[in-house]
Amino acid sequence: DAGVIQSPRHEVTEMGQEVTLRCKPISGHNSLFWYRQTMMRGLELLIYFNNNVPIDDSGMPEDRFSAKMPNASFSTLKIQPSEPRDSAVYFCASSLGSSGPYEQYFGPGTRLTVT
Amino acid sequence: AQSVAQPEDQVNVAEGNPLTVKCTYSVSGNPYLFWYVQYPNRGLQFLLKYITGDNLVKGSYGFEAEFNKSQTSFHLKKPSALVSDSALYFCAGTGANNLFFGTGTRLTVIP
């Protein structure tokens, strides 16, 4: 099993540009999570999906952030327009369920730098 | 609100000594509790989980955790620390329809 796949692994962009982060969950998992990690704020849950449907997006910082899951094997997190304060490591994780006894499997992360 | 708390930001322990990373929980009903580890420049990795039954849960890399209902704790332990155990450790839990992570504890094992 390849695990959770994220791309790109590193992204450097200029303020104002659109950024799209991609995630492929583990096959058979029906829950997908997007997190952001910074030194200042730690690990933050941004949004999660069950069966491709967004369940809780209360962690999305503002309207510049959007996430989609068009099918069970692909999700995107988009930032438009990007700002320097969006610089962080973004993780995608998947699991067999969003509640209950299901552990999450994390991807390697995308390190985003906005200059 | 349901949550987990990690009271220590940093734990230092000498190599070969036992280690404990603390976690307390506030979860209604039956809690499902987890420990994850994050090595530098990596995603979080699942270590172990408590669902029900035996209060002592064994996981990867020689780690174990003890579920204590009366103290609402789920501390992570290892009998003999290795330098390679140095990492960031997260406690997590799930409730009826939500999930939550602790703030993390950085463990440093001193040679």
Image (cartoon, rainbow, N blue to C red):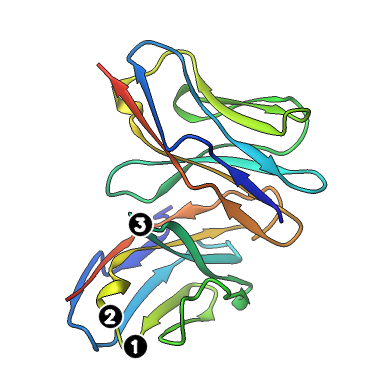
Mark 3 — on which chain does it sit?
A: A
Circle 3 SS class: loop
Task: Name the one closer to the observer, B103 or B57.
Answer: B103
Report the quarter where the N terminus of chain B lies.
bottom right
Instruction: Find numbered disc 1 in the image and state the secondary structure of the residue it sits on.
Output: loop
Residue A4, percent from left and from top: 42, 59
- In the rendered structure, which disc, 3 or 1, sits on the residue that comes first in sequence? 3
Type of residue at label 2? Glu
Q: State the CA–CA distance, disc 1 to disc 2.
A: 9 Å
Residue B40 image point, x, y percent: 28, 44
Would you place residue A54 above or below residue A105 in this image?
below
Name the outermost residue toward the right. Answer: B29
Q: Quadrant of residue B18?
A: top left
Pointer 3 or 2: first along the chain: 3
Which chain does the residue under circle 2 lie in? A
Q: Quadrant of residue A37?
A: bottom left
Q: Amino acid at mark 3?
A: Met
> Are the residues tagged 3 and 2 within 8 Å (C-beta)?
no
- Residue carrying label 3: A40
Dot label at residue A80: 1
Q: Is residue B81 left or right of residue B68?
A: left
| Figure check: A60 above or below B95 | below
Which residue type carries mark 1?
Gln
Closer to us: mark 3 or mark 1?
3
Left or right: where A69 falls relative to B111: right
